[in-house]
Amino acid sequence: MKQARRMVIAAALFAWAAFPSSFGVISTAGAAGPIIDVEKEGDRRIQIGIDLYKQLTGDLGVPPGDILAFDLELSGWFEPIRPGVMVPTGIADWARKGAEVVTEMSAAPGGFIGRVRDAGTGNVLLEKTYASSEGSMRRRMHRFSDDIVQTLTGEKGIATTQIVCEWNSGKGKRVVRMDVDGYGMKEITGEGALELSPRWSSDGSKILYTSFSSGYPDVYLQDLKAGNRKRIAHYQGLNAFGDLHPNGNLLVLTMSSSGDPEIYTKDLSSGKIHRLTHHKATDTSPVWSPDGSRIAFASDRTGGPQVYVMNADGSSPKQVTLRGDYNTAPEWSPDGTRIAYCALRPDGFQIQVVELASGGVTTVTEGGGCEDPCWSPDGRSILYSRSAGGRTDLYITDLSERKALRITRGSGKFTTPDWSPIP
Amino acid sequence: MKLDVVWWKSVGVLFTAGILVAGCGKSKPAPAPDISAPADTTTTTDNEAPPERTGEDVQYVDPNSQYASILRPIRFEFNKYRITEESKPTLEGIAKLLKQNATWKVLIEGHCDEQGTNEYNLTLGEQRAQATRRYLASLGVDDGRLQTVSYGEERPTNMGHDESAWAENRRCEFKVEAPRS
Protein backbone atom coordinates (compact mmCIF):
# COMPACT_ATOMS: atom_id res chain seq x y z
CA MET A 1 0.00 0.00 0.00
CA LYS A 2 2.72 2.35 1.01
CA GLN A 3 4.58 1.54 -2.15
CA ALA A 4 1.63 2.44 -4.35
CA ARG A 5 1.46 5.84 -2.73
CA ARG A 6 5.20 6.39 -3.00
CA MET A 7 4.95 5.73 -6.70
CA VAL A 8 2.40 8.43 -7.22
CA ILE A 9 4.33 10.78 -5.03
CA ALA A 10 7.22 10.13 -7.40
CA ALA A 11 4.94 10.97 -10.32
CA ALA A 12 4.01 14.23 -8.68
CA LEU A 13 7.64 15.06 -8.09
CA PHE A 14 8.40 14.36 -11.68
CA ALA A 15 5.69 16.78 -12.68
CA TRP A 16 7.11 19.38 -10.32
CA ALA A 17 10.63 18.87 -11.65
CA ALA A 18 9.38 19.23 -15.20
CA PHE A 19 7.32 22.37 -14.61
CA PRO A 20 8.79 24.20 -11.60
CA SER A 21 7.70 27.54 -13.00
CA SER A 22 4.07 26.61 -12.40
CA PHE A 23 4.53 27.33 -8.69
CA GLY A 24 2.71 30.30 -7.38
CA VAL A 25 -0.41 28.66 -8.62
CA ILE A 26 -1.18 25.12 -7.57
CA SER A 27 1.49 22.48 -8.13
CA THR A 28 1.04 20.29 -11.16
CA ALA A 29 0.64 17.23 -8.99
CA GLY A 30 -3.08 17.17 -9.75
CA ALA A 31 -2.38 16.89 -13.44
CA ALA A 32 0.00 13.98 -12.82
CA GLY A 33 -2.72 11.98 -11.08
CA PRO A 34 -3.59 11.29 -7.49
CA ILE A 35 -0.94 10.62 -4.91
CA ILE A 36 -2.86 8.12 -2.86
CA ASP A 37 -4.40 5.15 -4.62
CA VAL A 38 -8.01 5.66 -3.58
CA GLU A 39 -9.14 2.25 -4.81
CA LYS A 40 -6.57 0.40 -2.74
CA GLU A 41 -6.10 2.74 0.19
CA GLY A 42 -9.53 4.30 0.50
CA ASP A 43 -9.94 3.26 4.11
CA ARG A 44 -6.57 4.46 5.31
CA ARG A 45 -5.84 8.00 6.46
CA ILE A 46 -2.63 9.78 5.48
CA GLN A 47 -0.62 10.87 8.53
CA ILE A 48 -0.04 14.59 8.09
CA GLY A 49 2.15 16.75 10.34
CA ILE A 50 0.63 20.17 11.04
CA ASP A 51 2.32 22.85 13.12
CA LEU A 52 0.35 25.69 14.77
CA TYR A 53 1.77 28.48 12.56
CA LYS A 54 1.14 30.94 15.41
CA GLN A 55 3.02 33.67 13.58
CA LEU A 56 0.11 33.83 11.11
CA THR A 57 -2.67 34.03 13.71
CA GLY A 58 -3.33 37.74 13.21
CA ASP A 59 -6.96 38.59 14.03
CA LEU A 60 -8.02 34.99 13.45
CA GLY A 61 -8.23 34.29 17.19
CA VAL A 62 -6.88 30.74 16.84
CA PRO A 63 -3.64 29.42 15.34
CA PRO A 64 -4.23 28.66 11.64
CA GLY A 65 -2.80 25.17 12.16
CA ASP A 66 -5.86 24.33 14.28
CA ILE A 67 -8.23 25.25 11.44
CA LEU A 68 -6.20 23.30 8.91
CA ALA A 69 -5.96 20.23 11.16
CA PHE A 70 -9.74 20.22 11.74
CA ASP A 71 -10.44 20.61 8.02
CA LEU A 72 -8.10 17.79 7.06
CA GLU A 73 -9.48 15.47 9.71
CA LEU A 74 -13.02 16.32 8.55
CA SER A 75 -12.09 15.47 4.98
CA GLY A 76 -11.80 11.85 6.06
CA TRP A 77 -8.52 11.47 4.16
CA PHE A 78 -6.04 12.59 6.82
CA GLU A 79 -5.00 11.94 10.40
CA PRO A 80 -3.39 15.16 11.63
CA ILE A 81 -0.30 14.87 13.79
CA ARG A 82 -0.02 17.94 16.03
CA PRO A 83 3.18 19.36 17.55
CA GLY A 84 2.49 18.38 21.19
CA VAL A 85 4.87 19.43 23.95
CA MET A 86 8.02 18.64 22.02
CA VAL A 87 7.60 20.73 18.89
CA PRO A 88 9.28 18.98 15.96
CA THR A 89 12.23 20.99 14.78
CA GLY A 90 12.42 19.79 11.21
CA ILE A 91 10.99 17.46 8.67
CA ALA A 92 12.96 14.45 9.93
CA ASP A 93 11.54 15.10 13.37
CA TRP A 94 8.00 15.06 11.93
CA ALA A 95 8.79 11.80 10.15
CA ARG A 96 9.92 10.28 13.44
CA LYS A 97 6.52 11.24 14.90
CA GLY A 98 4.87 9.20 12.15
CA ALA A 99 4.09 11.94 9.62
CA GLU A 100 4.11 10.84 5.99
CA VAL A 101 3.62 14.37 4.72
CA VAL A 102 4.11 17.71 6.48
CA THR A 103 2.41 21.07 5.94
CA GLU A 104 4.28 24.36 6.10
CA MET A 105 2.93 27.90 6.20
CA SER A 106 4.91 31.08 5.92
CA ALA A 107 4.07 34.73 5.50
CA ALA A 108 4.37 36.18 2.02
CA PRO A 109 3.71 39.67 0.70
CA GLY A 110 -0.08 40.06 0.58
CA GLY A 111 -0.86 36.65 2.01
CA PHE A 112 0.77 33.36 2.97
CA ILE A 113 2.44 30.47 1.23
CA GLY A 114 1.07 27.01 1.95
CA ARG A 115 3.32 24.05 1.25
CA VAL A 116 3.20 20.27 1.64
CA ARG A 117 6.35 18.14 1.71
CA ASP A 118 6.92 14.42 1.63
CA ALA A 119 8.19 13.70 5.15
CA GLY A 120 10.46 10.96 3.87
CA THR A 121 12.26 12.83 1.10
CA GLY A 122 11.55 16.46 1.90
CA ASN A 123 10.30 17.00 -1.62
CA VAL A 124 7.64 19.65 -2.17
CA LEU A 125 4.30 18.18 -3.30
CA LEU A 126 2.23 21.36 -3.23
CA GLU A 127 3.12 25.02 -3.02
CA LYS A 128 0.70 27.86 -3.49
CA THR A 129 0.31 31.48 -2.46
CA TYR A 130 -2.99 32.36 -0.78
CA ALA A 131 -3.43 36.11 -1.21
CA SER A 132 -5.44 38.04 1.38
CA SER A 133 -7.43 39.51 -1.50
CA GLU A 134 -8.95 36.02 -1.97
CA GLY A 135 -10.96 36.18 1.27
CA SER A 136 -10.64 35.88 5.03
CA MET A 137 -7.78 33.92 6.58
CA ARG A 138 -10.25 31.23 7.62
CA ARG A 139 -11.57 30.99 4.05
CA ARG A 140 -8.06 30.70 2.66
CA MET A 141 -7.21 27.95 5.19
CA HIS A 142 -10.22 25.99 3.89
CA ARG A 143 -8.93 26.43 0.34
CA PHE A 144 -5.45 25.29 1.40
CA SER A 145 -7.07 22.18 2.92
CA ASP A 146 -9.03 21.45 -0.26
CA ASP A 147 -5.87 21.89 -2.35
CA ILE A 148 -4.05 19.39 -0.10
CA VAL A 149 -6.89 16.87 -0.52
CA GLN A 150 -6.95 17.38 -4.28
CA THR A 151 -3.17 17.09 -4.64
CA LEU A 152 -2.72 14.02 -2.46
CA THR A 153 -5.88 12.08 -3.36
CA GLY A 154 -7.08 13.44 -6.71
CA GLU A 155 -10.52 13.98 -5.13
CA LYS A 156 -12.30 17.27 -4.39
CA GLY A 157 -12.17 18.49 -0.79
CA ILE A 158 -15.17 19.67 1.23
CA ALA A 159 -13.60 22.35 3.45
CA THR A 160 -15.15 25.24 1.49
CA THR A 161 -18.68 23.81 1.63
CA GLN A 162 -21.41 25.15 3.90
CA ILE A 163 -24.18 23.77 6.07
CA VAL A 164 -27.71 24.99 6.69
CA CYS A 165 -29.65 23.85 9.74
CA GLU A 166 -32.25 24.86 12.30
CA TRP A 167 -30.87 26.78 15.27
CA ASN A 168 -32.93 27.11 18.43
CA SER A 169 -31.51 29.79 20.71
CA GLY A 170 -34.38 29.32 23.16
CA LYS A 171 -36.52 31.86 21.29
CA GLY A 172 -37.67 29.46 18.57
CA LYS A 173 -36.02 27.95 15.55
CA ARG A 174 -34.34 29.93 12.79
CA VAL A 175 -32.63 28.68 9.65
CA VAL A 176 -28.90 29.44 9.79
CA ARG A 177 -25.96 28.68 7.55
CA MET A 178 -22.34 28.23 8.51
CA ASP A 179 -19.05 26.94 7.18
CA VAL A 180 -18.67 23.19 7.40
CA ASP A 181 -16.37 23.57 10.43
CA GLY A 182 -19.18 25.33 12.33
CA TYR A 183 -17.83 28.90 12.06
CA GLY A 184 -19.35 31.97 10.45
CA MET A 185 -22.95 31.20 11.43
CA LYS A 186 -25.66 33.59 10.25
CA GLU A 187 -29.44 33.55 9.99
CA ILE A 188 -30.65 33.41 6.41
CA THR A 189 -33.80 35.53 6.83
CA GLY A 190 -33.63 37.52 10.09
CA GLU A 191 -37.40 37.21 10.01
CA GLY A 192 -38.27 35.88 13.46
CA ALA A 193 -40.93 33.28 12.62
CA LEU A 194 -40.51 29.57 13.32
CA GLU A 195 -38.36 28.18 10.48
CA LEU A 196 -37.75 24.49 9.78
CA SER A 197 -36.17 21.92 7.45
CA PRO A 198 -33.79 23.95 5.25
CA ARG A 199 -32.44 22.36 2.10
CA TRP A 200 -30.00 23.57 -0.58
CA SER A 201 -30.86 23.77 -4.26
CA SER A 202 -28.48 21.55 -6.20
CA ASP A 203 -26.52 24.57 -7.50
CA GLY A 204 -26.11 25.97 -3.98
CA SER A 205 -27.68 29.34 -4.86
CA LYS A 206 -30.99 28.92 -3.03
CA ILE A 207 -32.36 27.46 0.16
CA LEU A 208 -35.81 25.93 0.53
CA TYR A 209 -37.33 25.85 3.96
CA THR A 210 -40.60 25.70 5.87
CA SER A 211 -41.65 28.87 7.73
CA PHE A 212 -44.57 29.76 9.98
CA SER A 213 -44.39 33.37 8.85
CA SER A 214 -48.12 33.33 8.01
CA GLY A 215 -48.92 31.49 11.24
CA TYR A 216 -49.07 28.23 9.28
CA PRO A 217 -46.40 26.02 7.74
CA ASP A 218 -45.57 27.14 4.19
CA VAL A 219 -42.64 26.40 1.88
CA TYR A 220 -40.34 29.30 0.99
CA LEU A 221 -37.45 29.67 -1.41
CA GLN A 222 -34.63 31.97 -0.32
CA ASP A 223 -32.32 33.33 -3.01
CA LEU A 224 -28.94 33.72 -1.30
CA LYS A 225 -27.46 36.14 -3.82
CA ALA A 226 -30.47 38.40 -4.25
CA GLY A 227 -31.27 38.10 -0.54
CA ASN A 228 -35.02 37.81 -1.17
CA ARG A 229 -37.53 35.04 -0.69
CA LYS A 230 -40.71 33.72 -2.24
CA ARG A 231 -43.57 31.81 -0.66
CA ILE A 232 -44.01 28.92 -3.07
CA ALA A 233 -46.57 26.64 -1.37
CA HIS A 234 -49.35 27.86 0.91
CA TYR A 235 -52.30 25.57 0.37
CA GLN A 236 -54.86 24.51 2.95
CA GLY A 237 -53.15 22.51 5.73
CA LEU A 238 -49.48 21.57 5.92
CA ASN A 239 -46.94 22.65 3.28
CA ALA A 240 -43.49 21.41 4.19
CA PHE A 241 -40.17 19.71 3.39
CA GLY A 242 -39.57 20.93 -0.14
CA ASP A 243 -36.78 19.50 -2.26
CA LEU A 244 -35.88 20.93 -5.68
CA HIS A 245 -35.24 18.57 -8.59
CA PRO A 246 -31.49 18.39 -9.43
CA ASN A 247 -32.14 19.70 -12.95
CA GLY A 248 -34.44 22.57 -12.28
CA ASN A 249 -37.68 23.95 -11.07
CA LEU A 250 -39.70 20.91 -10.02
CA LEU A 251 -40.40 21.00 -6.30
CA VAL A 252 -41.38 17.86 -4.41
CA LEU A 253 -43.07 18.46 -1.06
CA THR A 254 -45.55 17.28 1.57
CA MET A 255 -49.04 18.82 1.63
CA SER A 256 -52.19 17.88 3.53
CA SER A 257 -54.97 19.78 1.76
CA SER A 258 -56.60 16.44 0.92
CA GLY A 259 -57.03 15.72 4.64
CA ASP A 260 -53.84 13.78 5.26
CA PRO A 261 -50.17 14.35 4.38
CA GLU A 262 -49.46 13.35 0.77
CA ILE A 263 -46.55 13.93 -1.60
CA TYR A 264 -46.92 16.37 -4.48
CA THR A 265 -44.75 18.02 -7.07
CA LYS A 266 -45.10 21.65 -8.06
CA ASP A 267 -43.51 23.08 -11.19
CA LEU A 268 -42.19 26.47 -10.15
CA SER A 269 -42.25 27.81 -13.73
CA SER A 270 -45.81 26.86 -14.67
CA GLY A 271 -47.25 26.52 -11.15
CA LYS A 272 -48.66 23.11 -12.11
CA ILE A 273 -49.27 20.67 -9.28
CA HIS A 274 -49.24 16.91 -9.42
CA ARG A 275 -50.22 14.55 -6.62
CA LEU A 276 -47.98 11.47 -6.33
CA THR A 277 -49.30 9.46 -3.36
CA HIS A 278 -52.83 8.28 -2.55
CA HIS A 279 -52.72 6.54 0.76
CA LYS A 280 -54.77 6.90 3.91
CA ALA A 281 -51.54 7.22 5.82
CA THR A 282 -48.75 9.70 6.49
CA ASP A 283 -46.58 10.22 3.40
CA THR A 284 -43.82 12.74 4.04
CA SER A 285 -40.18 13.92 3.79
CA PRO A 286 -39.77 13.42 0.02
CA VAL A 287 -36.30 13.77 -1.55
CA TRP A 288 -35.20 13.50 -5.17
CA SER A 289 -32.60 10.91 -6.09
CA PRO A 290 -29.40 12.57 -7.36
CA ASP A 291 -30.36 11.75 -10.98
CA GLY A 292 -33.91 13.04 -10.46
CA SER A 293 -35.54 9.79 -11.59
CA ARG A 294 -36.85 8.64 -8.20
CA ILE A 295 -38.13 9.98 -4.90
CA ALA A 296 -37.45 8.57 -1.44
CA PHE A 297 -39.99 9.35 1.29
CA ALA A 298 -41.25 8.19 4.68
CA SER A 299 -44.67 6.61 5.13
CA ASP A 300 -46.55 4.84 7.93
CA ARG A 301 -48.77 2.91 5.49
CA THR A 302 -47.73 -0.41 7.04
CA GLY A 303 -47.68 0.69 10.70
CA GLY A 304 -44.64 2.57 11.95
CA PRO A 305 -42.90 4.93 9.53
CA GLN A 306 -40.66 3.27 6.91
CA VAL A 307 -38.59 4.57 4.03
CA TYR A 308 -39.92 4.00 0.51
CA VAL A 309 -38.64 4.75 -2.98
CA MET A 310 -40.95 5.49 -5.91
CA ASN A 311 -40.53 6.70 -9.47
CA ALA A 312 -40.66 10.43 -10.19
CA ASP A 313 -44.31 10.08 -11.32
CA GLY A 314 -45.30 8.31 -8.10
CA SER A 315 -45.40 4.82 -9.61
CA SER A 316 -43.93 1.61 -8.15
CA PRO A 317 -43.42 2.55 -4.49
CA LYS A 318 -41.12 0.05 -2.82
CA GLN A 319 -40.28 -0.25 0.88
CA VAL A 320 -36.50 -0.10 1.39
CA THR A 321 -36.22 -0.24 5.19
CA LEU A 322 -37.31 -3.67 6.37
CA ARG A 323 -36.06 -3.78 9.96
CA GLY A 324 -37.50 -2.00 12.98
CA ASP A 325 -40.74 -0.05 13.11
CA TYR A 326 -39.51 3.56 13.02
CA ASN A 327 -37.34 4.62 10.06
CA THR A 328 -37.63 8.22 8.84
CA ALA A 329 -35.80 11.18 7.26
CA PRO A 330 -34.35 9.51 4.13
CA GLU A 331 -31.40 11.05 2.23
CA TRP A 332 -29.79 9.69 -0.94
CA SER A 333 -26.04 9.21 -1.21
CA PRO A 334 -24.56 11.41 -3.96
CA ASP A 335 -24.11 8.35 -6.21
CA GLY A 336 -27.71 7.25 -5.65
CA THR A 337 -26.79 3.74 -4.47
CA ARG A 338 -27.54 4.15 -0.76
CA ILE A 339 -30.03 5.90 1.50
CA ALA A 340 -29.27 7.18 4.99
CA TYR A 341 -32.13 7.51 7.48
CA CYS A 342 -32.96 7.82 11.16
CA ALA A 343 -33.87 4.52 12.82
CA LEU A 344 -35.27 3.80 16.28
CA ARG A 345 -33.08 0.96 17.59
CA PRO A 346 -33.10 -0.78 20.99
CA ASP A 347 -30.30 1.67 21.98
CA GLY A 348 -32.14 4.79 20.79
CA PHE A 349 -32.29 6.80 17.57
CA GLN A 350 -29.37 6.00 15.25
CA ILE A 351 -28.32 6.85 11.73
CA GLN A 352 -28.36 3.88 9.40
CA VAL A 353 -27.47 3.42 5.74
CA VAL A 354 -29.20 0.91 3.47
CA GLU A 355 -27.54 -0.18 0.24
CA LEU A 356 -30.38 -0.29 -2.27
CA ALA A 357 -29.03 -3.11 -4.46
CA SER A 358 -28.36 -5.60 -1.66
CA GLY A 359 -30.64 -4.34 1.11
CA GLY A 360 -27.62 -4.48 3.44
CA VAL A 361 -27.89 -2.15 6.44
CA THR A 362 -25.07 -0.40 8.31
CA THR A 363 -25.45 1.54 11.57
CA VAL A 364 -23.26 4.63 11.37
CA THR A 365 -23.66 6.19 14.81
CA GLU A 366 -23.29 5.16 18.44
CA GLY A 367 -25.00 6.16 21.64
CA GLY A 368 -28.45 7.20 20.42
CA GLY A 369 -30.07 10.62 20.13
CA CYS A 370 -29.05 10.84 16.45
CA GLU A 371 -31.47 12.29 13.89
CA ASP A 372 -31.77 13.80 10.40
CA PRO A 373 -28.79 12.53 8.41
CA CYS A 374 -27.46 14.07 5.20
CA TRP A 375 -24.46 13.18 3.05
CA SER A 376 -21.27 15.08 2.40
CA PRO A 377 -21.12 16.08 -1.27
CA ASP A 378 -18.25 13.60 -1.75
CA GLY A 379 -20.33 10.78 -0.23
CA ARG A 380 -17.64 9.92 2.32
CA SER A 381 -19.31 11.26 5.47
CA ILE A 382 -22.69 11.78 7.08
CA LEU A 383 -23.82 14.90 8.92
CA TYR A 384 -26.57 14.61 11.55
CA SER A 385 -27.80 16.08 14.81
CA ARG A 386 -27.18 14.39 18.13
CA SER A 387 -28.76 15.13 21.50
CA ALA A 388 -26.61 14.21 24.48
CA GLY A 389 -25.89 15.73 27.89
CA GLY A 390 -28.43 18.55 27.48
CA ARG A 391 -26.94 19.75 24.17
CA THR A 392 -28.07 19.14 20.61
CA ASP A 393 -25.21 19.54 18.13
CA LEU A 394 -24.26 18.69 14.59
CA TYR A 395 -21.74 15.90 14.08
CA ILE A 396 -19.96 14.55 11.03
CA THR A 397 -19.04 10.88 10.90
CA ASP A 398 -16.91 9.44 8.10
CA LEU A 399 -18.20 6.13 6.81
CA SER A 400 -14.85 4.32 6.75
CA GLU A 401 -13.61 4.84 10.31
CA ARG A 402 -16.87 6.13 11.81
CA LYS A 403 -15.15 8.80 13.83
CA ALA A 404 -17.69 11.41 15.00
CA LEU A 405 -16.54 15.06 14.90
CA ARG A 406 -18.68 17.72 16.55
CA ILE A 407 -18.90 20.85 14.42
CA THR A 408 -21.20 23.17 16.42
CA ARG A 409 -19.95 24.78 19.59
CA GLY A 410 -22.15 27.78 20.29
CA SER A 411 -25.18 28.07 22.53
CA GLY A 412 -28.55 26.73 21.46
CA LYS A 413 -29.63 23.58 19.70
CA PHE A 414 -28.70 22.66 16.14
CA THR A 415 -30.97 20.33 14.17
CA THR A 416 -32.03 19.10 10.71
CA PRO A 417 -28.84 19.95 8.76
CA ASP A 418 -28.33 19.95 5.01
CA TRP A 419 -24.94 20.06 3.28
CA SER A 420 -24.23 22.39 0.35
CA PRO A 421 -22.77 21.16 -2.92
CA ILE A 422 -19.04 21.75 -3.49
CA PRO A 423 -18.80 25.37 -4.69
CA MET B 1 -25.81 -9.53 9.40
CA LYS B 2 -27.13 -9.25 5.89
CA LEU B 3 -30.80 -9.32 5.23
CA ASP B 4 -32.19 -11.97 2.96
CA VAL B 5 -34.14 -9.55 0.81
CA VAL B 6 -35.89 -12.13 -1.34
CA TRP B 7 -37.22 -13.96 1.68
CA TRP B 8 -38.39 -10.80 3.41
CA LYS B 9 -40.18 -9.64 0.31
CA SER B 10 -42.03 -12.91 0.02
CA VAL B 11 -43.33 -12.78 3.56
CA GLY B 12 -45.56 -9.77 3.16
CA VAL B 13 -45.38 -6.53 5.00
CA LEU B 14 -47.69 -7.03 7.97
CA PHE B 15 -46.26 -10.43 8.76
CA THR B 16 -42.79 -8.88 8.56
CA ALA B 17 -43.77 -6.28 11.10
CA GLY B 18 -45.04 -8.99 13.43
CA ILE B 19 -41.81 -10.97 13.16
CA LEU B 20 -39.72 -7.89 13.79
CA VAL B 21 -41.68 -7.01 16.89
CA ALA B 22 -41.47 -10.55 18.20
CA GLY B 23 -37.71 -10.62 17.68
CA CYS B 24 -37.06 -7.23 19.23
CA GLY B 25 -35.98 -6.82 22.85
CA LYS B 26 -37.86 -3.57 23.37
CA SER B 27 -41.00 -4.85 21.76
CA LYS B 28 -44.01 -2.81 20.79
CA PRO B 29 -47.34 -4.20 19.68
CA ALA B 30 -47.92 -4.31 15.95
CA PRO B 31 -49.86 -1.19 15.05
CA ALA B 32 -53.59 -1.68 14.70
CA PRO B 33 -55.45 -0.18 11.75
CA ASP B 34 -56.25 3.41 12.56
CA ILE B 35 -59.98 3.93 12.85
CA SER B 36 -59.57 7.67 12.60
CA ALA B 37 -57.81 7.42 9.23
CA PRO B 38 -59.13 9.91 6.72
CA ALA B 39 -61.68 8.95 4.13
CA ASP B 40 -60.28 8.55 0.66
CA THR B 41 -60.16 12.09 -0.60
CA THR B 42 -59.22 11.49 -4.21
CA THR B 43 -62.28 13.25 -5.55
CA THR B 44 -60.04 15.67 -7.39
CA THR B 45 -57.71 14.65 -10.18
CA ASP B 46 -53.98 14.40 -9.57
CA ASN B 47 -53.35 17.56 -11.57
CA GLU B 48 -55.87 19.80 -9.87
CA ALA B 49 -54.37 22.51 -7.69
CA PRO B 50 -55.38 22.16 -4.03
CA PRO B 51 -57.30 25.04 -2.43
CA GLU B 52 -55.10 27.86 -1.17
CA ARG B 53 -55.27 28.43 2.55
CA THR B 54 -57.95 30.80 3.76
CA GLY B 55 -58.39 32.45 7.13
CA GLU B 56 -54.73 33.23 7.75
CA ASP B 57 -55.80 36.60 9.11
CA VAL B 58 -58.03 35.12 11.81
CA GLN B 59 -56.46 35.59 15.25
CA TYR B 60 -56.89 32.75 17.72
CA VAL B 61 -56.39 32.98 21.49
CA ASP B 62 -56.54 30.65 24.48
CA PRO B 63 -60.13 30.08 25.61
CA ASN B 64 -61.04 32.21 28.62
CA SER B 65 -61.36 30.69 32.08
CA GLN B 66 -65.06 30.04 31.63
CA TYR B 67 -64.44 27.59 28.80
CA ALA B 68 -60.87 26.44 29.41
CA SER B 69 -62.04 23.33 31.26
CA ILE B 70 -64.17 22.30 28.28
CA LEU B 71 -61.69 23.26 25.54
CA ARG B 72 -58.93 21.32 27.26
CA PRO B 73 -56.11 19.49 25.43
CA ILE B 74 -56.59 15.89 24.40
CA ARG B 75 -53.72 13.41 24.48
CA PHE B 76 -52.39 10.79 22.09
CA GLU B 77 -50.36 7.59 22.27
CA PHE B 78 -46.72 7.53 21.12
CA ASN B 79 -46.48 7.85 17.33
CA LYS B 80 -50.29 7.57 16.96
CA TYR B 81 -53.01 9.96 15.84
CA ARG B 82 -55.99 7.79 16.68
CA ILE B 83 -58.52 9.49 18.98
CA THR B 84 -58.33 7.57 22.27
CA GLU B 85 -61.38 6.42 24.26
CA GLU B 86 -60.33 8.81 27.06
CA SER B 87 -60.44 11.77 24.67
CA LYS B 88 -63.89 11.11 23.30
CA PRO B 89 -65.89 12.60 26.24
CA THR B 90 -63.72 15.75 26.00
CA LEU B 91 -64.44 16.05 22.28
CA GLU B 92 -68.16 15.47 22.88
CA GLY B 93 -68.12 18.33 25.40
CA ILE B 94 -66.31 20.55 22.88
CA ALA B 95 -68.77 19.65 20.12
CA LYS B 96 -71.68 20.54 22.39
CA LEU B 97 -70.11 23.88 23.29
CA LEU B 98 -69.44 24.71 19.63
CA LYS B 99 -73.01 23.85 18.65
CA GLN B 100 -74.29 26.16 21.41
CA ASN B 101 -72.02 28.95 20.12
CA ALA B 102 -72.52 28.68 16.40
CA THR B 103 -70.35 31.67 15.45
CA TRP B 104 -67.17 30.49 17.15
CA LYS B 105 -64.21 29.51 15.03
CA VAL B 106 -61.70 27.14 16.56
CA LEU B 107 -58.05 26.41 15.79
CA ILE B 108 -56.93 22.85 16.49
CA GLU B 109 -53.17 22.70 17.15
CA GLY B 110 -51.46 19.32 16.76
CA HIS B 111 -48.36 18.68 18.87
CA CYS B 112 -45.88 15.84 19.43
CA ASP B 113 -43.29 14.77 21.97
CA GLU B 114 -39.59 15.23 21.19
CA GLN B 115 -38.97 11.60 20.27
CA GLY B 116 -38.26 10.99 16.61
CA THR B 117 -37.33 13.27 13.76
CA ASN B 118 -38.65 16.82 13.68
CA GLU B 119 -39.98 16.39 10.16
CA TYR B 120 -41.91 13.25 10.91
CA ASN B 121 -43.34 14.88 14.01
CA LEU B 122 -44.55 17.92 12.07
CA THR B 123 -46.51 15.52 9.87
CA LEU B 124 -47.72 13.49 12.85
CA GLY B 125 -48.99 16.67 14.55
CA GLU B 126 -50.90 17.46 11.35
CA GLN B 127 -52.47 13.99 11.43
CA ARG B 128 -53.50 14.54 15.07
CA ALA B 129 -55.09 17.90 14.26
CA GLN B 130 -56.88 16.49 11.20
CA ALA B 131 -58.11 13.40 13.12
CA THR B 132 -59.49 15.72 15.82
CA ARG B 133 -61.14 17.92 13.22
CA ARG B 134 -62.78 14.88 11.58
CA TYR B 135 -63.99 13.61 14.94
CA LEU B 136 -65.60 16.95 15.82
CA ALA B 137 -67.17 17.11 12.36
CA SER B 138 -68.57 13.60 12.88
CA LEU B 139 -70.25 14.95 16.03
CA GLY B 140 -72.02 17.59 13.94
CA VAL B 141 -69.68 20.59 14.14
CA ASP B 142 -69.50 22.53 10.85
CA ASP B 143 -66.10 21.67 9.37
CA GLY B 144 -65.74 25.22 8.02
CA ARG B 145 -65.42 26.56 11.57
CA LEU B 146 -62.41 24.34 12.30
CA GLN B 147 -58.90 25.40 11.30
CA THR B 148 -55.88 23.14 11.88
CA VAL B 149 -52.17 23.70 12.33
CA SER B 150 -49.31 21.41 13.31
CA TYR B 151 -46.38 22.54 15.41
CA GLY B 152 -44.80 19.08 15.53
CA GLU B 153 -42.41 18.89 18.48
CA GLU B 154 -41.61 22.61 18.34
CA ARG B 155 -43.88 23.80 21.19
CA PRO B 156 -43.79 21.38 24.11
CA THR B 157 -45.97 22.22 27.10
CA ASN B 158 -43.72 20.26 29.48
CA MET B 159 -39.98 20.80 29.03
CA GLY B 160 -39.05 17.49 30.69
CA HIS B 161 -37.42 14.56 28.92
CA ASP B 162 -39.28 11.60 30.42
CA GLU B 163 -42.41 9.63 29.64
CA SER B 164 -44.70 11.79 31.79
CA ALA B 165 -43.50 14.95 30.00
CA TRP B 166 -43.79 13.26 26.61
CA ALA B 167 -47.35 12.06 27.38
CA GLU B 168 -48.35 15.66 28.14
CA ASN B 169 -46.73 16.93 24.95
CA ARG B 170 -48.50 14.47 22.61
CA ARG B 171 -51.64 16.54 22.34
CA CYS B 172 -54.10 18.70 20.48
CA GLU B 173 -54.88 22.12 21.92
CA PHE B 174 -57.89 24.27 21.12
CA LYS B 175 -57.80 28.03 20.51
CA VAL B 176 -60.81 30.25 19.81
CA GLU B 177 -61.16 33.19 17.48
CA ALA B 178 -60.24 36.42 19.22
CA PRO B 179 -63.08 38.93 19.55
CA ARG B 180 -62.75 41.46 16.72
CA SER B 181 -62.38 45.01 17.93
Image (tube, coloured by chain):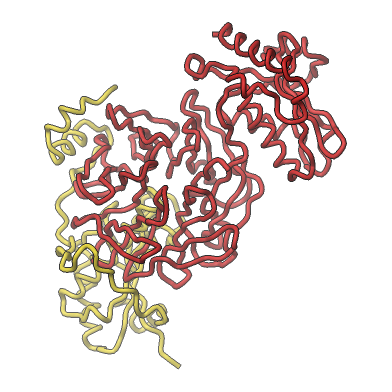
Question: Is A327 on the left-hand or right-hand side of A108?
Answer: left
Q: Residue A52 versus residue B59: which sits nearer the camera? A: A52
Q: Residue A66 versus residue B140: which sits nearer the camera? A: A66
Q: Residue A397 versus residue A129: which sits nearer the camera? A: A129
Tell me residue A320's x, y (percent): 26, 37
Tell me residue A410's x, y (percent): 63, 48
Name chain B's colour. yellow
Can the viewer see residue A142? yes
Q: Where is the N terminus of chain A found, in terms of image quarters? A: top right
Query: Number of numbered discs present?
Result: 0
Residue at the image point whose x is 40% and y is 78% from the top: B56
| Residue positioned most to the right | A109
| Residue positioned most to the top | A3
Tell me: residue A275, above or below residue B27.
below
Q: Answer with the quarter of the image where residue B67 lies.
A: bottom left
Residue at the image point whose x is 40% and y is 53% from the top: A243
Q: Answer with the quarter of the image where residue A408 lies.
A: top right
Can the viewer see residue B72? no
Residue at the image point whose x is 42% and y is 31% from the top: A364
**Which chain wears red?**
A
Q: Answer with the quarter of the image where residue A340 lies.
A: top left
Tell me residue A402's x, y (percent): 48, 27
Tell me: residue A97, above or below residue A258.
above
Q: Residue A370 versus residue B71: which sits nearer the camera? A: A370
Q: Where is the C terminus of chain A found, in terms of image quarters? A: top right
Question: Is A30 on the left-hand or right-hand side of B58?
Answer: right
